[in-house]
């Protein structure tokens, strides 16, 4: 018998549990450990922050769903991963042994790296549902006394799409409330240009996003570094190509939402051979850690080098479909090992993204996500808003049913040529 443990129950962890269960032998055991007994559909957080959704709309109680699938579940956070002993210490002082460990924790949010930053400081966040709910309350108060708004992503951020989404969703909501004319809006980002997304753009994301922002009278600042945040004031440095400070601006605001940099969670940081200096999990092309060969990792916690040098550090995002491709490769590779084989599956890291703008949006397909690409396509229109709503309902439903990829979804993706696994040569 083998005991497989999945750390984390976000998008990567839940899908990982379902796909791993399908690969087990009858005698094998699967356990998920996580700090939160509820799953929340993170892509809906921008809607939560303007009260277009409520918590119960995007929440799944994992215990009954896992029980139905025969998956063990412990809603206790990990304290320390101990690879040399093949065990994980939990926050309650207990230990859980494993034969294979799959780390799918997502990141820790590094708000503390900037003075006055984050929900405990003076800016809002949509990275977690708790933060999004707090942002919603702050936004309601803001609307009683409209002032300038700042939205964006700080230095070291690796998740830019939600910042753009929230920017345009807020703009749409302000128009609906008939107060848009009272609110100057500025997008502040570490990206070297609008639409870079940590990916050097996809298709014409630069042109599409700049056009949307010009059309909606939104100003922007690129290659920007947040120096500090005080109540109602953000100090931002514009960085030149040589890394010098080109200008420093003190920007007033009545409401600000800035995405932070990520780092690995405390339970893995500093574990020799497991992580990079930021605490992200090192993996090979089979999603396996090169040092500890019975540890795999998927999702945002995986170490991926940046696209290249930029005046302000920009990380590489891990989008939903890209994460799902990591999951499928990992599940099938461990399945091979359990049966005496060796890992042969590699994730494509293809990306399919729907970015909602409140009443329109941008979609892109990148195959693979990191250039150079075989497919590099983007488009915009009102259809994207409708598609994002439809996807939200579909994804939450299949998570509640304990499914990862129903046959009709796989058939459609195969028809479109969007695969999760690289084809064997």
Image (cartoon, helix red, strand yellow):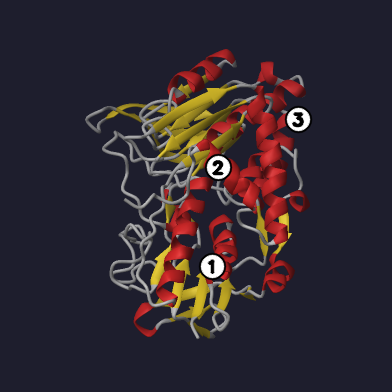
Q: Mark 2 points at which residue?
A: 413
Work out whether residue 123 can be spotted: no
Give the Cα separation between the discs numbered 2 and 1: 21 Å
Q: Where is residue 55 in the image (x, y as percent from the top left)?
A: 74, 51
Residue at image point 55% right, 42% down = 413
Q: Name the residue under label 1.
A: 20
Q: How crowded is mark 1: few (under 14 residues within 10 Å), some or many (20 or more)?
A: many
| Above or below: residue 246 compared with residue 23 | above
Residue 425 image point, x, y percent: 31, 50
Can you give x and y, in whole percent of width and height, for residue 308 in the image?
Answer: 27, 38
Question: Disc 1 on helix, strand or loop?
Answer: helix
Label 3 vs label 1, nearer the camera: 1
What residue is rendered at 57% in x and 76% in y?
Answer: 31
Q: Is 243 placed left or right of 279 in the picture?
A: left
Question: Mark 2 or mark 1, which has the lower sequence index?
Answer: 1
Q: How crowded is mark 3: few (under 14 residues within 10 Å), some or many (20 or more)?
A: few
CA distance for labels 3 and 1: 49 Å
Could you tell which of marks 2 and 3 lies nearer the N-terminus? 3
Residue 144 disc label? 3
Dot 2, how many residues are within 10 Å of its Cα: few (below 14), some (14-19), or many (20+)? few
């Amino acid at each position: 018998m083998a005991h497989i443990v999945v750390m984390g129950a976000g998008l990567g962890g839940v899908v990982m549990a379902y796909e791993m269960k399908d690969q087990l032998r009858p005698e094998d055991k699967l356990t998920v450990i996580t700090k939160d007994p509820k799953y929340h559909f993170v892509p809906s957080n921008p809607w939560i922050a303007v009260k277009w959704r409520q918590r119960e709309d995007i929440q799944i109680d994992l215990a009954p769903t896992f029980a139905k699938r025969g998956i063990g579940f412990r809603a206790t956070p990990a304290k320390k991963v101990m690879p040399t002993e093949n065990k994980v210490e939990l926050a309650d002082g207990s230990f859980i042994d494993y034969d294979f460990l799959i780390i799918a924790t997502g990141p820790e949010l590094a708000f503390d790296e900037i003075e006055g930053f984050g929900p405990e400081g003076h800016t809002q966040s949509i990275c977690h549902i708790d933060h999004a709910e707090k942002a919603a309350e702050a936004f309601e108060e803001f609307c009683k006394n409209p002032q300038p708004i700042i939205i964006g992503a700080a230095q070291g951020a690796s998740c830019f799409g939600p910042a753009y989404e929230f920017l345009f969703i807020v703009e749409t909501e302000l128009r609906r409330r008939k107060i848009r004319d009272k609110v100057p809006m500025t997008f502040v980002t570490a990206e070297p240009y609008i639409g870079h997304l940590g990916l050097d753009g996809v298709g014409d994301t630069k042109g599409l996003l700049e056009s949307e922002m010009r059309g909606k009278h939104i100003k922007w600042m690129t290659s920007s570094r947040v120096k500090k945040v005080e109540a109602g004031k953000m100090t931002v440095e514009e960085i030149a190509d040589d890394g010098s400070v080109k200008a420093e601006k003190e920007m007033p605001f009545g409401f600000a939402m800035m995405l932070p940099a990520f780092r690995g969670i405390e339970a893995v940081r500093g574990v020799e051979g497991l992580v990079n200096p930021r605490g992200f999990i090192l993996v090979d092309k089979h999603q396996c850690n090169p040092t500890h060969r019975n540890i795999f990792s998927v999702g945002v916690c995986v170490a991926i080098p940046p696209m290249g040098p930029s005046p302000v550090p920009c990380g590489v995002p891990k989008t939903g479909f890209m994460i799902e491709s990591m999951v499928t490769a990992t599940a099938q590779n461990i399945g091979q090992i359990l049966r005496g084989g060796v890992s042969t599956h590699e994730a494509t890291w293809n990306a399919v993204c729907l970015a909602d703008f409140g009443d329109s949006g941008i979609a892109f397909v990148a195959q693979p996500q990191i250039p150079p690409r075989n497919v590099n396509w983007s488009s915009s229109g009102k259809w994207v808003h409708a598609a994002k709503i439809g996807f939200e309902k579909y994804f939450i439903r299949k998570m509640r049913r304990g499914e990862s990829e129903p046959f009709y979804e796989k058939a459609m993706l195969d028809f479109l040529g969007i695969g999760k696994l690289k084809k064997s040569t």
